[in-house]
């Protein structure tokens, strides 16, 4: 059984990946734990209402856990009431890779796609800085998620998000040839590369100290400046590339240090938003019955979305 097959009132006894643990206090004043559990098909919140002293020591993000409990409907969303648990041991012969959601495109395909777009960057300064920074963080770039939650929050999510954005950009450059292709491609490749420093890793992902205090936008803007200085590159396009990174969230209230002030920066914001939102749709609507509405989606302004019946009938 997988998480995407869970139904209300089911009793489960199975291994799942423990993605995160949050401690809370109930209205009664008693502590409780929320366990964010995952497998390769999705995620579910689990609750431990009777907290023991050893729970904080035992429950570590990124570890496999065997849980027993009941699936309940809480405000229209499935929740697991955990009765018993134990952490997996070597004798269980559990391969954590079997429980990790991964990008829907093979890694070697995405790497080939990325290399194609790197070759399409004709400006030597932009291409050199972009390749050098990719080489520096290559291992993390091809395995890390693009976010801790919300969108592309799975193994290899970062490279998948990036290559999808590049394909959208290619289509837009074909429609609007006045866009600077080199700047747009370089900006897309580097815009989220700072998440390889901001986030702790591909499994049990949390924020690093640098991630909490600086954030991926500032981290990568600074990396571009340092790399250009190391390579002896002084050019306007390096300043423009840093602006692309600093402005890609589009608005101050979205955490953007700068507002877009060139058209390529404006476009990268919209491309980023399109891909992030489409992934949230894919993630949250996949198991919604046709003819019904989804839960309210926090990342989409708290709206809930209808899944039409004719989509299934015509496909």
Image: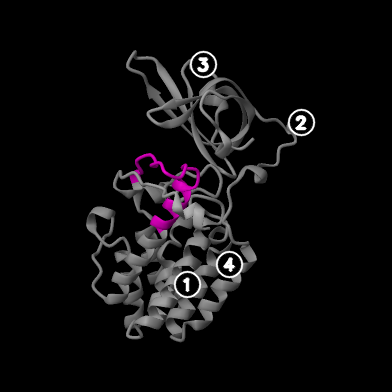
Query: Magenta stretch containing residue 25, yes or no?
Result: no
- Provide the secondary structure element on which disc 3 rests: loop
Mark 4, residue position: 110
Which tag, 1 or 4, sits closer to the chain's start?
A: 4
Q: Secondary structure at mark 4?
A: helix
Do labels 1 and 4 touch, CB within 8 Å?
Answer: no
Mark 1–mark 2 distance (CA, rounded to whole Å): 45 Å
Q: Which mark is residue 91?
A: 2
Query: Which x, y percent locates residue 75?
Result: 37, 28
Kindly identify which residue carries mark 1.
167
Mark 4 residue crowding within 10 angstroms, few (<14) / some (14–19) / many (20+): some
At a point 56% along the width and 52% down the height, the residue shown is 155
- Residue at point 32%, 17% (across, down): 27
Tell me if I can see residue 165 in this picture: yes
Residue under circle 3?
Answer: 52
> Which residue is pictured at 26% across the width and 60% down the height?
257
Q: Nearer the viewer, residue 243 or 27?
A: 27
Q: Which residues are magenta?
A: 276-298
Single out the mark in the foreground, 1 or 4. 1
Q: Is residue 151 visible?
A: no
Identify which residue is drawn at 45% across, 55% down: 279
Q: CA distance from mark 2 to mark 3?
A: 25 Å
């Amino acid at each position: 059984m997988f998480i995407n097959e869970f139904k209300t009132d089911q009793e489960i006894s199975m291994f799942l990946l423990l993605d995160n643990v949050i401690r809370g206090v109930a209205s009664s004043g008693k502590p409780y734990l929320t366990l964010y559990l995952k497998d390769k098909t999705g995620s579910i919140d689990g609750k431990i209402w009777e907290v023991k002293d050893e729970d904080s020591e035992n429950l570590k993000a990124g570890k496999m856990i065997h849980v027993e409990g009941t699936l309940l409907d809480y405000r229209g969303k499935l929740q697991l009431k955990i009765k018993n648990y134990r952490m997996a041991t070597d004798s269980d012969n559990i391969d954590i890779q079997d429980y990790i959601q991964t990008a829907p495109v093979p890694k070697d395909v995405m790497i080939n796609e990325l290399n194609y777009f790197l070759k399409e960057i004709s400006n030597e300064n932009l291409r050199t800085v972009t390749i050098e920074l990719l080489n520096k963080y290559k291992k993390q770039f091809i395995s890390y998620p693009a976010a801790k939650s919300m969108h592309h929050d799975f193994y290899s999510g970062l490279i998948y998000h990036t290559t999808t954005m590049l394909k959208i950009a290619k289509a837009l450059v074909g429609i609007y040839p006045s866009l600077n292709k080199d700047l747009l491609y370089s900006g897309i490749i580097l815009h989220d590369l700072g998440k390889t420093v901001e986030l702790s890793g591909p499994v049990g992902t949390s924020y690093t100290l640098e991630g909490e205090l600086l954030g991926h936008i500032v981290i990568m803007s600074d990396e571009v400046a340092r790399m250009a200085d190391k390579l002896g590159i002084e050019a306007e396009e390096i300043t423009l590339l840093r602006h692309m990174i600093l402005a890609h969230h589009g608005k101050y209230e979205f955490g953007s240090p700068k507002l877009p002030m060139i058209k390529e920066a404006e476009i990268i914001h919209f491309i980023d938003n399109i891909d992030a939102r489409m992934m949230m749709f894919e993630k949250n609507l996949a198991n919604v019955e046709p003819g019904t509405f989804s839960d309210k989606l926090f990342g989409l302004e708290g709206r809930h979305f209808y899944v039409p019946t004719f989509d299934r009938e015509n496909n």
